[in-house]
Amino acid sequence: MEHCKTCREPLEKVAERLKRLEEILAKKQRTDPDQVFFDNQEFIQIMNICKRTAQAWRDEGIIAYSQVGIKVYYRLSDILALLDKHHKPAKS
């Protein structure tokens, strides 16, 4: 599967952005990550990927999602689980 070149951004940078976003959301909402949703456009911006990659990840079962009509939503907890699953610890 061919993905766009912006998808090669180090996972650590994506994780850092998500962590900052999670902190902002926590201050504003004090909500369980299972109750915080992002639409497809927000997900694409958070992960710095293209629409085609987001679609491929859904098709391949890489990311869980909900769909209502043509709108696609992702739980914050599912985004964090995706990053945790693909986390590679630094070599010491």
Image: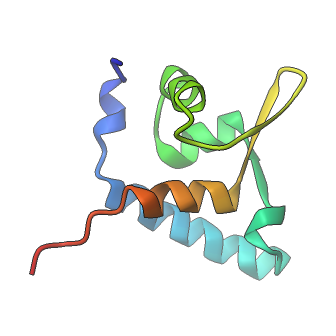
Q: Residue 15 at x, y = what percent?
A: 44, 62
Instruction: Name the residue furthest right.
Output: 69
Considering only vertical position in the picture, is 60 above or below 78? above
Instruction: Name the residue furthest front.
Output: 61
Considering only vertical position in the picture, is 27 above or below 5? below
- Image quadrant in which the N terminus is located: top left
Position of residue 5 in the picture relative to residue 81 (left or right): left
Q: Residue 68 at x, y = what percent?
A: 90, 30
Image quarter of residue 45: top right
Q: Tell me which colouring the rendered structure shows.
A: rainbow
Q: Residue 30 at x, y = what percent?
A: 82, 81
Observer-nearest residue: 61 or 32?
61
Please report the residue visible at 36 percent of the width from the left and 23 percent of the height from the top.
3
Considering only vertical position in the picture, is 36 above or below 91? above
Q: Residue 59 at x, y = what percent?
A: 58, 24
**How many discs mark residues in the rendered view?**
0
Position of residue 40 in the picture relative to residue 6 (left or right): right
Position of residue 77 in the picture relative to residue 10 (left or right): right
Please report the residue visible at 29 percent of the width from the left and 51 percent of the height from the top.
10
- Image quadrant in which the C terminus is located: bottom left
Observer-nearest residue: 40 or 24?
40
